[in-house]
Image (spheres, grey):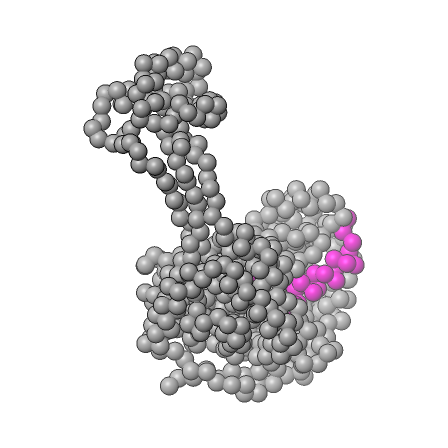
């Protein structure tokens, strides 16, 4: 049987081994999640809330162990794993416990349309069924954990496929749910790479997919899902811009941007990769950013004195080296870093600030996904905005300024899913927010109420009392035709005179209308509709 060997990116130590799922195993897991769905969907919301409470207690009690597993297998410092992996998971549970039940309630919708007056209409939310949760390695705990908690709370079940780089963290996610009392089949797990992901998407028991990863794999997932078709949520890459205005607090901005660019060794979908700083502040800002970046301590994720750990894999390191070298060759100024840190281990790279990368170089267009930030001077807001939007991606963006009104104006024109002002990335840790992008960064939302609604289908329930036939049923009559044509005029004709004449022609039909509909009982509602 094929297996995946998990090793630590910090020192190559072997951490464990998991079996790769074959097609039969994938089908078995998905089928078992489907059977579990039939029971789980009927579970009262109060029971779901209770399970989440137990899960939250487990998470709170075991936060250190979880953070250490993440640090060991993925490479981010333990403190960072606590802040960016465990804490958002706790917050997601708290959100679902407190705000989730209300969001799931069915809603009565008053009828506006006069011919349907008097009926009872309701919008209900229904789970889709089995979701494939295909997860990346960069936030191997918080991303699938929050997605699965949301899916299960909505009454869905899930099959998780963790990244082959972080299978053990995936096992921790599933184990926590099961120990919190969720039935084993409500959350299944299969291991493997792209092939296993593809088989899972194609599996007939799977009704929907939430995919978090790169744009190429995301496109492929969408292609495969289209065959059924299945619902798809795509959380893809980013190349986030930060706009630094001349009036910004430059010290604070440089500190915040250094963190937002280098967090998790820059392997964050929403890390700052591009800074557009006003010419008036450029030199001072670059000096400050270089000072902050050069002070970042690279090292062992288990060392309390470490800010940035290793990259997650040799492929990641090669990519970062290739993109920085390409920018250097094209003439970009490397103001700090720009080299691997072999003294620390095989996969470490120095936090890097690049100034004015030429437009043609790869760094200017492609997601780098490493500890590298590029800075460019711009002449004012309009140019900054145009540069920020001139990108295939649109995940998040930030504006650094003391002028709140200007920031709000700019935010509206930024093509992305999240805009933050004088901060970046932090809304990922706030379950009440929304998360997701536009353009090549994908579509659909996770987090908060919108994220919960994304996991559910709407069902419209239209209840007629059934005392008489509908007015439009057979046989069609000349009177019905004339009346419906006059009604169209009455609703939409721009001329008041024409509408008044149409209303007059209704007079002989009032008895007919009263017998066949409840239109006349609408009173002022009818006038409002016609207004
Ligand atoms: P990846 O696309 O290589 O892999 C992501 C997951 O998809 C893995 O589990 C992988 O095994 C699986 N996969 C790969 N090819 C597949 C296919 N053809 N069919 C089905 N599954 C397939 O991405 P990665 O390297 O793990 O993660 C990095 C990328 O993820 C970056 O682009 C990053 O920006 C993005 N990301 C986005 C978000 C977000 O919220 N928008 C969050 C984290 C990461």
- At 35% from the left edge and 37% from the top edge, which residue is drawn? 464
The number of numbered discs placed on residues in the rendered structure image is 0
Across and down, in percent, residue 248 comes to 76, 51
Dominant SS of magenta comes to helix
Across and down, in percent, residue 405 comes to 71, 42
In the image, 172 versus 375, the foreground residue is 172
Where residue 302 sits, quadrant-wise, is: bottom right
Screen quadrant of the N terminus: bottom left
Report the residue that reaches farthest toward the left: 475
User: Do we see residue 330 in this rendering?
Assistant: no
- At 22% from the left edge and 30% from the top edge, which residue is drawn? 474
Residue 494 lies, with reference to residue 67, above or below; the image says: above
Say left or right for 27 vs 158. Answer: left
Where residue 190 sits, quadrant-wise, is: bottom left
User: Do we see residue 35 in this rendering?
Assistant: yes
Across and down, in percent, residue 120 comes to 41, 38
Where residue 192 sits, quadrant-wise, is: bottom left
In the image, 205 versus 50, the foreground residue is 50
In the image, 519 versus 253, the foreground residue is 519
- At 60% from the left edge and 47% from the top edge, which residue is drawn? 414
Say left or right for 523 vs 102. Answer: left
Numbered range of the magenta stretch: 246-269
Residue 261 lies, with reference to residue 512, above or below; the image says: below
Across and down, in percent, residue 254 comes to 74, 60
Say left or right for 10 vs 452. Answer: right
Report the residue that reaches farthest toward the bottom: 14
248 within the magenta span:
yes
192 within the magenta span:
no
Report the residue that reaches farthest toward the front: 467
């Amino acid at each position: 049987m094929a297996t995946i060997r998990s090793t630590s990116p910090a020192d190559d130590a072997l951490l464990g081994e998991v079996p790769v799922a074959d097609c039969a195993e994938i089908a078995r897991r998905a089928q078992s999640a489907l059977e579990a769905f039939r029971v789980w969907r009927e579970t009262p919301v109060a029971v779901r809330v209770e399970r989440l409470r137990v899960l939250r207690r487990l998470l709170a009690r075991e936060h250190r162990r979880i953070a250490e597993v993440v640090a060991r297998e993925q490479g981010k410092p333990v403190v960072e794993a606590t802040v960016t992996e465990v804490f958002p998971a706790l917050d997601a549970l708290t959100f679902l416990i407190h705000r989730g039940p209300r969001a799931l309630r069915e809603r009565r919708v008053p009828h506006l349309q006069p011919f349907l007056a008097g009926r009872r209409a309701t919008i209900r939310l229904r789970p889709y069924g089995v979701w494939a949760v295909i997860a990346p390695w960069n936030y191997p705990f918080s991303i699938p954990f929050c997605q699965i908690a949301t899916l299960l709370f909505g009454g869905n079940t899930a099959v998780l496929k963790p990244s082959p780089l972080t299978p053990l963290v995936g096992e921790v996610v599933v184990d926590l749910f099961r120990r919190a009392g969720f039935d084993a089949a409500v959350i299944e797990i299969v291991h493997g790479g792209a092939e296993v992901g593809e088989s899972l998407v194609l599996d007939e028991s799977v009704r929907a997919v939430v995919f978090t990863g790169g744009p190429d794999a995301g496109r492929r997932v969408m292609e495969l899902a289209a065959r059924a078709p299945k619902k798809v949520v795509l959380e893809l890459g980013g190349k986030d811009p930060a706009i630094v205005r001349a009036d910004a607090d430059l010290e604070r901005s440089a500190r915040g941007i250094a963190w937002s660019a280098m967090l998790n060794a820059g392997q964050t979908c929403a890390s700052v990769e591009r800074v557009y700083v006003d010419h008036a502040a450029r030199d001072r800002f670059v000096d400050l950013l270089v000072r902050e970046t050069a002070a970042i301590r690279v090292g062992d994720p288990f060392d309390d004195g470490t800010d940035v750990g290793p990259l997650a894999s040799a492929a990641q390191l090669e990519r970062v080296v290739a993109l920085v070298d390409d920018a250097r060759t094209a003439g970009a100024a490397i103001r700090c870093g720009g080299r691997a840190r072999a003294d620390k281990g095989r996969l470490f790279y120095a936090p890097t600030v690049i100034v004015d990368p030429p437009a043609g170089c790869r760094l200017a267009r492609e997601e780098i996904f490493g500890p590298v930030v590029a800075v460019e001077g711009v002449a004012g807001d309009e140019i900054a905005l145009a540069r920020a939007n001139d990108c295939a991606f649109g995940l998040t963006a930030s504006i650094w300024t003391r002028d709140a009104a200007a920031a709000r104006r700019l935010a509206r024109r930024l093509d992305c899913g999240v805009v933050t002002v004088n901060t970046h990335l932090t809304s990922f840790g706030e379950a009440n927010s929304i998360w997701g992008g536009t353009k090549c960064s994908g579509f659909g939302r996770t987090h908060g109420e919108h994220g919960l609604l994304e996991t559910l289908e709407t069902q419209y329930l239209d209840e007629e009392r059934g005392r008489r036939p509908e007015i439009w049923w057979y046989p069609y009559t000349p009177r019905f035709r004339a009346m419906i044509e006059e009604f169209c005029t009455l609703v939409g004709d721009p001329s008041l005179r024409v509408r008044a004449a149409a209303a007059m022609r209704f007079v002989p039909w009032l008895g007919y209308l009263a017998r066949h509909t409840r239109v006349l009982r609408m009173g002022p509602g009818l006038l409002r509709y016609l207004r």
